[in-house]
Image: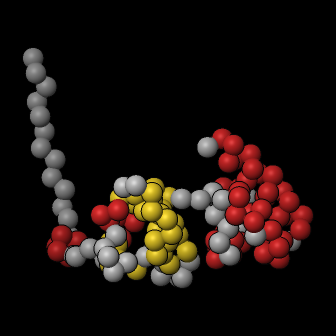
Amino acid sequence: MKPKRRRIEVEVEPEAKARPPLPVAVRVVQMNGPTRLVEWLDEHRHPHRCLVPHESVRPDGIATEADLLAGVPWGLPWEEMDVEPQDAIVLRQEGVWTADDLHEHWPAVKRALGAEAALILSKAADEMSKEV
């Protein structure tokens, strides 16, 4: 006996159906074959980075919000390393996305977090980078 197939209907609000993709200005940080590392600012002016297919970025530097949300997030998740959210934002604004960036921008990291917290974060970032 075959199981019966059930039809599931989902209601979508009319404006969600008709809403055009939201354009977002991005900066291409790096091009690597078929992908682009892009950076953009959200509505609070907080920086974000992700990897997207090259065709997701128009020549004028515009990508859709949907493409950015579907992209692969890039950079260490500072918030998962017991960094306060506002400090994670400052790190990214200072260009600190990876363990290498952390060492390269050491004076800015120490100013943002304090010397002791920066040292602890440095060790955690190095460990997390080894896992990836």
Q: Which residue lies at the image location 17% right of the left edge and 74% below the top edge?
A: 18
Front position in the image: 102 or 48: 102
Quadrant the C terminus occupies = top right
Q: Which residue lies at the image location 35% right of the left edge and 59% below the top edge?
A: 53
Q: Is any part of residue 102 visible from this angle?
A: yes
Quarter-wise, where is residue 12 in the image? bottom left
**Side of 107 where 125 appears, left or right:** left
Residue 47 in the image: state x and y as whole percent.
55, 74
Residue 127 in the image: state x and y as whole percent.
74, 46
Q: Which residue lies at the image location 83% right of the left edge and 64% below the top edge?
A: 118
**Side of 13 where 29 appears, left or right:** right
Q: Which residue lies at the image location 77% right of the left edge and 62% below the top edge?
A: 103
Residue 129 in the image: state x and y as whole percent.
68, 48
Above or below, 6 against 41 in this view is above
Front position in the image: 24 or 11: 24
Above or below, 65 against 3 in this view is below
